[in-house]
Image (spheres, rainbow, N blue to C red):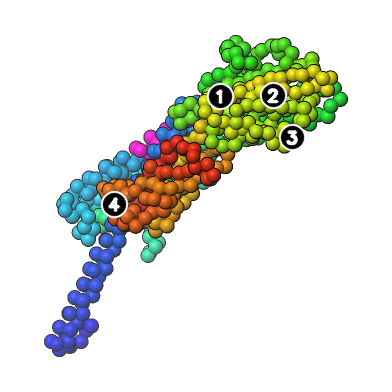
């Protein structure tokens, strides 16, 4: 282009061509800088989301460790180590980024095209062919993180260990263009535009949070797998009745019962035939509550109450309802609820009422709300009050009449939870796209309830932050709600609350207030 004798006109054309090429290169450079800036934003958002999940995980683990220290205290201790190691490096990287961005004018922090200089880190890390103390400190912090994490991992979690070694290596790197080996810090940070270096630092922070999240999940899963191992089970004898006549067929069955020495109730509330058991009458041994009582006089005896555990900071009672018979001959009825030790208002509670050794047609039972079905099957639909007493009587083959009664507690149907697209969020926000929310149905569920009830949603309130609440009739967003949703930003949360619902086939029963739904928009 520049060789030979050229006319002034040709020289001008060639000069303009060179200027044009330079302009193209300049424009491409600005586009690349903008691309780095957008990538940095995306990684930052992902890091924030992962950090929030890690924080929630640690809060939940702390609750579990306080409630069941034998099972979760060791996991919590190791998780705290991981958190401290991760936070040390993350804080150092964040301070470095803040110092670097402090050299950029406030109104240019979002203008990635002007962040094209490499001066800051070049002057901070390097002095000729050698590293400054700040450069060595950068390497030392990364190497310390890797060493400390591998020490915590030990021989466990080899996949996480391999990930730490790969993502936080500071070994020399061979250049692709000439195969020359150069120091890791020079290869990754010397001469790079500021926005490119910032993106690399953000990527390291994301690796820290992702590694922590993966490790915490595996640690908890491992502990739960141990707790659920078959080594924690023993066999129990399950039988239809507590006493049999001589020569009568035995219809018992062997079932598995979980016995975990690390799972101990925080409190025990038990009664024997209505009388509270004192601490001297029971003891907790090897994951079971051992009773130290006398069999008592002839007849049936009832053990009732609750084993109280702490779960998420709240007391949860596991009902105990068991009976045993001290027998000379059958003299009392065995009455038990098929599904639970209580009956629920607003639903049909199936019950079995029988007396051992007496045919079903010789047994009768009565109570408010009780109706007889086939054989020994009954249906209880309780009314008002907190208790109901069932009276049962029967005639033995020798003509002797016996009768007994049993009291059951009446409970209301538990509080339903709101759901969108069938998801309740389990205490956290449901993540879904804006278009999906527009067409999804709002529903209500009774989680962990023994009865399968169909709930029909008749209306709800819809709230987008900064906008008026929209009252909706039916179970889908109306036009006003969709309009409010259209003005919501990506990543914003919206709420569905004041959900109204009725039980299918029993619209007269008033349900408890339904839990609201939190939805995080993903687009």
Give the SS element for disc 4.
helix
Element at label 2: strand
Left or right: residue 101 compared with residue 350: left
Residue 354 is left or right of residue 91, and the answer is right
User: Pointer 3: residues within 10 angstroms few (<14), some, or many (20+)?
Assistant: few
Are dots 1 and 2 in contact, CB under 8 Å?
no
The residue stretch that appears in magenta = 80-88
From the image, tell me which residue sits under label 4. 198
Quarter of the figure that contains the C terminus: bottom left
Query: Marks 4 and 2, Cα distance to the nearest angstrom?
Result: 79 Å
Cα–Cα span, label 3 and label 4: 77 Å
Counting from the top left corner in percent of width and height, residue 483 is at 31, 57
Reading the chain from its start, which is encountered first: label 3 or label 1?
A: 3
Mark 4 or mark 1: which is in front? 1
Q: Nearer the viewer, residue 446 or 88?
A: 446
Q: Is residue 29 left or right of residue 339?
A: left
The residue labelled by disc 2 is: 392
For marks 1 and 2, the one nearer the N-term is: 1
List the residue tagged with mark 3: 375
**Pointer 3 or 4: first along the chain:** 4
Q: Are marks 3 and 2 in contact (CB under 8 Å)?
A: no
């Amino acid at each position: 282009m520049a060789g030979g004798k050229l006319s002034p006109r040709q020289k001008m054309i060639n000069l303009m061509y060179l200027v044009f090429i330079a302009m193209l290169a300049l424009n491409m450079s600005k586009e690349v800088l903008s691309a780095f800036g957008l990538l940095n934003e995306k990684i930052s958002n992902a890091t924030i989301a992962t950090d929030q999940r890690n924080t929630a995980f640690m809060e939940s683990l702390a609750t579990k460790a306080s409630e069941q220290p034998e099972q979760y205290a060791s996991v919590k201790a190791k998780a705290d180590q991981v958190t401290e190691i991760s936070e040390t490096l993350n804080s150092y990287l964040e301070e470095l980024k803040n110092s670097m961005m402090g050299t950029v004018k406030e109104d240019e922090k979002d203008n990635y095209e002007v962040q094209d200089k490499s001066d800051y880190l070049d002057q901070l890390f390097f002095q000729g062919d050698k590293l400054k103390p700040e450069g060595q400190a950068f390497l030392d912090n990364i190497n310390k993180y890797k060493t400390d994490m591998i020490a915590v991992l030990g021989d466990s979690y080899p996949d996480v260990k391999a990930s730490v070694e790969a993502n936080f290596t500071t070994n020399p790197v061979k250049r692709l263009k000439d195969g020359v080996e150069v120091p890791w810090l020079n290869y990754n940070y010397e001469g790079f535009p500021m926005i490119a270096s910032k993106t690399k630092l953000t990527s390291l922070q994301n690796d820290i949070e992702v590694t922590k999240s993966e490790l915490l999940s595996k640690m908890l899963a491992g502990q739960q797998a141990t707790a659920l191992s078959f080594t924690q089970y023993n066999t129990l004898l399950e039988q239809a009745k507590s006493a049999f006549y001589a020569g009568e067929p035995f219809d018992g069955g062997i079932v598995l019962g979980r016995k975990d020495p690390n799972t101990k109730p925080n409190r025990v509330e038990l009664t024997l035939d209505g009388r509270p058991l004192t601490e001297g009458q029971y003891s907790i041994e090897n994951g079971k509550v051992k009773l130290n009582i006398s069999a008592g006089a002839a007849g049936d005896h009832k053990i009732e109450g609750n084993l109280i555990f702490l779960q998420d900071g709240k007391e949860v009672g596991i009902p105990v309802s068991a009976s045993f018979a001290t027998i000379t001959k059958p003299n009392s009825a065995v009455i038990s609820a098929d599904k639970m030790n209580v009956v629920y208002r607003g639903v049909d509670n199936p019950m079995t009422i029988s007396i051992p050794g007496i045919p079903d047609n010789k047994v009768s039972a009565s109570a408010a709300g009780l109706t007889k079905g086939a054989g020994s099957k009954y249906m209880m639909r309780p009314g008002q009050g907190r208790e109901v007493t069932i009276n049962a009587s029967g005639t033995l083959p020798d003509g002797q009449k016996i009768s007994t009664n049993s009291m059951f507690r009446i409970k209301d149907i538990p509080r339903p939870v709101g759901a969108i697209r069938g998801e309740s969020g389990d205490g956290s926000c449901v993540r879904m796209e804006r278009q999906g929310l527009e067409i999804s149905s709002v529903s209500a569920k009774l989680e962990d309830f023994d009865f399968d009830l169909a709930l029909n949603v008749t209306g709800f309130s819809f709230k987008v932050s900064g906008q008026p609440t929209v009252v909706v009739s039916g179970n889908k967003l109306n036009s006003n709600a969709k309009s409010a949703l259209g003005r919501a930003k990506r990543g914003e949360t919206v709420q569905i609350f004041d959900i109204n619902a009725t039980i299918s086939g029993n619209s007269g029963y008033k349900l408890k207030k339904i839990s609201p739904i939190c939805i995080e928009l993903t687009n």
